Structures are given as structure tokens and as C-alpha cells.
Image: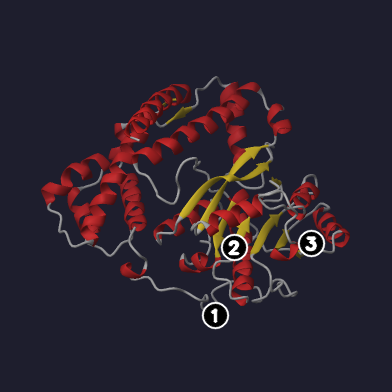
Amino acid sequence: MVSMESKGFQQVAEFPAGQLYGGFSQTLVQTPPSPYCEVCVIVPVRNEAERLAQTLAALAYQVDLEGQLLDSRRYEVILLANNCSDDSVAIAQNFAQQHPDFALHVIEKTLPPTEAYIGRVRQILMDEAYHRLNRLGRTRGVIASTDGDTRVSPTWIAATLHEIACGADGVGGRILTDPVERAALDPYTRACHLRLVGYNQWIAELEYYIDPDPYDSLPRHNLHFGASLAVTAQMYALAGGLPLVRTGEDHALYQALVRVNARFRHSPLVRVVTSARQTGRTDSGLANLLNKWSQMGQQQQSFLVQSAAAVETRFQARHQLRKMWSSVVNGLKPTYTHVAPLADTLGVSTQWLLEELAQPHTFGQLFQQVEERCLLEGIWLSRWEKVKIEEAIEDLRLRVDSLRRDRRRSQ
């Protein structure tokens, strides 16, 4: 992995003045952070009265990896309740009063329609967390995100800090669904959810065997959602902060981190339990997916996904591109003949790929350019038909089992 400095990046100590908070003051929380604070947890909330007390209790009673109560001075929680019409604010304020040693900052705001969406709210919160950690001089301090309908595990903070101490710049946690709410789903929806979990887990292992990341070794998963997403203050600034998008802001941040070669860990040690409700707060989220599966079940539609062959081919092509990019960084000038087979596999034009390889990209930037070009040209999508998820899971299982055996033989 090339250093960021060698690709023209410079360390950012602070965001430019006036870049953040469009319309808000530079300080969201008036109380200064504890000098011992290492983690700033952010919680966006909108009408979460039913689950909020459980969310806060899980954050208040954190323990270390040995099970001892975590020093409450090491972390704080910033809760932004925006445009609530229920008792969320009162519940949060009462919880703060009843737990005076728990550093919980409750902020209530009514945002205009142009800003009352999850991408903007999470951006406001993460920017505030960055500034508070930066004020303490904690470049490796952690901005940790969760949601108002989510219960973090007792070791959520400690496990996140462990991964950061091991060298990660960002951490995605394993996200489980509430077992009671999951059991209440109709059989087809529940089956789709569980199959998708299995499908993603097989893909996460296959990815490691084909295009391994030394900072994201097995066991691992492939989730990086706002319910459990953490990043160091230093890397948050280097990535330019949370991109301003209406939804999918968590994935957009992950992509921004990839572009600057952040060391990202998909940690099975970091876990949360989130709601399996079918009434969501955004247009794209788990609730919407659950509703989609429910409708598919009623219409007797199959759940179709990318085939195992398509997934593996993509990982192999990415690995080959990574090696080619590394060679270019080290001075190799690839020829048209050299690049053509890989360009064909990726579904992009050879001349375009040659030109992109000549640009001063990080590998993350290059591959994101390739992904966008693939969508534009449409060649890749036309080559691979989607298959039933049951078929894809079986093929992935067989392929991963084979790779596991090969690995054991080589050790």
C-alpha cells in the first residue's frame, strides 16, 4: 500500500474555516470535552421514543475487553434530536439527569426541510465530534457512529479502540437484527434477510482469499453502516469529512476513506443489534429492504443477486488491477497490449484504462473510477445475469471451502 504522502496527500490538521455546519455555529455542544476523552459517539435521533432508552443504556454501561466497567471519562455521546414529534428529547434529557457521570449531550433542533435528512444530520454530528477531538489534540481519537434504534454491545467502545490500536483508521461493526422483531417478520422476508446475511459473509471470506487486505484479515465481514461505523479524527479530516448526500452517507464516507488509502477494518469484535422494523426513517435502509422482500413474497418473486462467478471475477480483476497500479507507481509504463485483457475483464475500454493508470490516483480512487466507468459503459452488467440467492450461496460455499483447503495445504 503506497503512502499517502507519495501520492500527493498532505496531513490535514483542521477543516477550513466556514466549511462546516452551513447555517449552524461552529459549536454544537457548549460543554467542553473531558481532557481524558478518546471517543466521541454520535447518535442521530428522529422519533425514537420506543427504543431510545435501551440505546442510551447500552452506551452508558460500557466495559473493557476483560469485562471491567470502562472509565466514563474516556468517551462522550452527542445526541442530536432533529424534528422530533414524540418524547425522544424528554427521554434523552431524563436519562442524562439520572446518569450524571455519563457524558451525554442532548441537542434538539428543528431543521428546515432542505436539511432534515439523515445525511445532513450525521454530517453535523460527525463534524462536531471531529472538532471536539481536534481541540484535545487527539488525532487518533475516534468518532463513532450509531443510531437511535440500535443497541451497541457492552464492549463496543473497547473493541473499537482495540482495532484502532492495532492500526486501523476506520472500523465497521457487525450489525445484527433484533431477534424478537426478526421473528415477527413474515417467513419469506425473514428468509431473505437471513440468506442475505449468509451471502454477504461468504463474499467477505472469498474477498480475503482473492484480494486480501493486510489490515482486514479473517475473521471479517463486509458491513460499514452508520449503526456501527468509526473513524479516527485524523483520517476523517484527510478524507474531507462526511460527504453530503441525502442517504447512503455511511457508504459515501467509506468510499471517501478508501480513496485516501485508509486502513479499514470490518471487525467481528465490534457488534450492535439494530431494529428489524418495517417502518423506516429514510428512503433507503433496512426497513425499506424488508418491505421490498415482503412485497416480493406476496408476488412470489425470487430474490436475485450477483452470481458467485461474477463476484469472484470482480475480485480477481481488482487484484490484477491493484498489482498493475503498484507497478505503475514504481515506474512501469504499461502498454496497450499489457492492459487490454484486464480492461476487457473489467468491461472498460483499454485506452481509457491506460489514461487512468497514468493519473496520480491512489488505488482506491482508481478502482472507484473503474466502477463508475463500468456502469457508464454497461458491458459488465450485460455479461452477468443475476441468479437466485440460494444458488449463489451454494456456489460461494463450495468455492470458499475449496480455497480454505488450498490454504491449509499451503501452510
Give x and y (percent) for residue 335: 12, 53
Q: Amino acid at mark 2?
A: Val
Badge 2 element:
strand
Describe residue 164's horizontal placement relative to residue 350 as left or right.
right
Residue 4 image-quadrant placement: bottom left
Quadrant where the C terminus sits is top left
Position of residue 104 measured from the top left corner of the image (x, y, whole percent): 77, 62
Q: Residue at x 65, y 44 (%)?
A: 272
Q: Earlier in the sequence, mark 1 or mark 2?
A: 1
Disc 2: which residue:
142
x and y, in percent, of residue 8 in the image: 33, 71
Q: Are marks 1 and 2 in contact (CB under 8 Å)?
A: no
- The answer to whether residue 21 is visible is no
Give yes or no for contact between labels 2 and 3 (Cβ–Cβ under 8 Å). Answer: no
Other residues around mark 1 within 10 Å, as few (<14) / some (14–19) / many (≥20): few
The three-letter amino acid code for the residue at tag 3 is Phe
Using the image, determine if residue 368 lies above or below residue 177: below
Residue 156, given in percent of the width and then of the height, sits at 65, 50
Q: Quadrant of residue 37?
A: bottom right
Label 1, on which residue?
Answer: 17
Q: Residue at x 31, y 36 (%)?
A: 313
Q: Amino acid at mark 1?
A: Ala
Say which residue label 3 marks.
Answer: 102
Q: Nearer the viewer, mark 1 or mark 2?
A: 2
Q: Residue at x 69, y 70 (%)?
A: 36
Question: Mark 1 to mark 2: distance in Å?
Answer: 22 Å
- Dot 2 or dot 3, earlier in sequence: 3
Q: CA distance from mark 3 to mark 1?
A: 31 Å
- Label disc, if present, on residue 225 of the rendered structure: none
Q: Are marks 3 and 1 in contact (CB under 8 Å)?
A: no
